[in-house]
Image (spheres, rainbow, N blue to C red):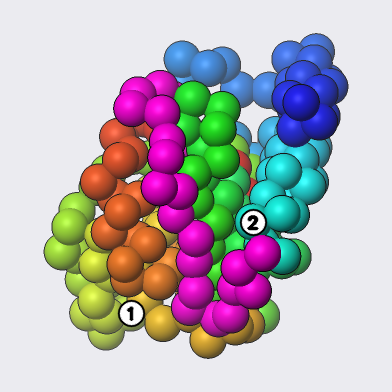
Amino acid sequence: MKRLACFATALAVAMASPCAASSSELGPDESPAALMTAAATVAAARDDALPVVEGNNLRPGGYWWADDMPSGGEMEVVVSLEDQKAYVYRAGQLIGVSTISSGKDGKETPPGIFPILEKKRSHFSRKYDNAPMPYMQRLDQWGIALHGGKVPGFRASRGCVRLPAAFAAKLFAMTEVGDRVVIG
């Protein structure tokens, strides 16, 4: 309930802002209102996931995935740049928590609200020496994506959100183009 209250407040602020993107647009929203919404959504997800995180002692490269989850409903991925964690929701229920590795200094992962624009099970970077990006889910037109990769416990990517390979595969199987990813 706390997550929904924080999100509702942030959403009200975002909807009142003339900078807020239309929900019918399929593209990233990095407006001030979106950044406020992202920050509130990340804080609520962190609070919501506290029992899972404390109970599972997630080390770098570790994750938790629910055994019991809704069979359908909207998917949402919430990424905390501060905590280096991703929180996955289906039909409003927390179904996964993972450690991540986001962008390092000079190649920071941008905060905002992003739709998944493209999905490819096997992808190689066009920007960075053909680097493998398994279970790639593109978030913008400039190369930012969720994908499987090394998660060393600190920010180490070139802007993408790296996920443990097994977690990336599970997430890839459940999301669709257009699903929302909130980064804050």
Residue interval drawn in magenta: 55-76
**53 displayed left or right of 74:** right
Which residue type carries mark 1?
Answer: Tyr
Q: Residue 158 carries which label?
A: none
Distance between the alpha carbons at the discs numbered 2 and 1: 35 Å
Find residue 28 and report its horizontal and vertical position in percent: 52, 38
- Asked if residue 62 lies in the magenta stretch, the reply is yes
On whether residue 114 falls in the magenta region, the answer is: no
**Rendered residue at 81%/31% (across/down):** 2
Query: Looking at the picture, how far across and down is residue 45, in whole percent?
Result: 69, 44
User: Mark 1 sits on what residue?
Assistant: 128
Label 2 element class = helix
Q: Nearer the viewer, residue 53 or 35?
A: 53
Tell which of 182 and 57 is nearer to you: 57
Give the side of residue 21 with respect to residue 127, left or right: right
In this rendered view, identify the residue nearer to me: 117 or 66. Answer: 66
Which of marks 1 and 2 precedes in the sequence?
A: 2
Decide: is 174 above or below 127. above
Q: Is residue 104 above or below residue 145?
A: below
Residue at numbered disc 2:
52
Residue 93 in view, yes or no? yes
Residue depicted at 64% across the width and 74% down the height: 57
Residue 12 locus on image (x, y percent): 80, 16
Query: At which x and y percent is residue 152?
Result: 53, 86
* Quarter location, residue 177: top left
Quadrant including the N terminus: top right
